[in-house]
Amino acid sequence: MKFIVNDMTCGHCRAAISEAVSEAGGTATIDLSRHEVAIEGLDQAKAEEVIRSAGYSPVPA
């Protein structure tokens, strides 16, 4: 599933989200220029919760 994360703006943001998703048991593919995060291995609710817990505001794409 994909999310748009408009407040993800830099490499630090990408690393924070990737690490949070990995710790939850999923994998994230991130396109920083498009503010897109594609997540595999987690259901949508868990993925959204993980991104929020990292300090960002995901919107389902």
Image: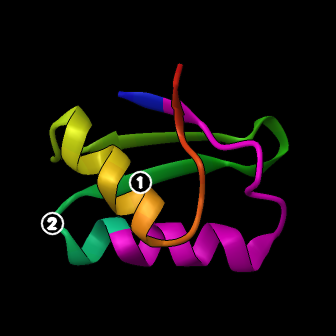
Tell me which corner region of the image, top left, top right, bottom left or bottom right, holds residue 19: bottom left
- Element at badge 2? loop
Quadrant of the rendered structure where residue 58 is? top right
Give percent across and percent down for residue 53: 41, 69
The residue lying at 22 percent from left, 58 percent from top is 26
Q: Is residue 5 left or right of residue 58?
A: right
Which residue, as the protein is rendered here, is positioned at the far top?
61
Q: Which residues are magenta?
A: 3-20
Gap between marks 2 and 1 measured at Cα? 10 Å
- Three-letter code for the amino acid on which mark 1 is drawn: Ala
Position of residue 59 measured from the top left corner of the image (x, y, whole percent): 54, 31
The disc label shown at residue 61, or none: none
Q: How many marks?
A: 2
Quadrant in the picture for the N terminus: top left
Residue 48 shown in magenta: no
Q: Relative to 2, say whether 23 is above or below.
A: below
The foreground one among 21 and 50 is: 50
Q: Position of residue 7 (x, y in %)?
A: 76, 53
Query: Which residue sits at x=30%, y=48%?
Result: 47
The amino acid pointed to by label 2 is: Gly
Residue at horizontal 20%, vertical 49%? 46
Residue labelled with disc 2? 25
Crowd band around label 1 with a 10 angstrom C-alpha radius: few (<14), some (14–19), many (20+): many
Residue placed under numbered mark 1 in the picture: 28
- Tell me, yes or no, whether the highlighted magenta stretch contains residue 15: yes
In the rendered view, would you say 61 is above or below 33?
Answer: above
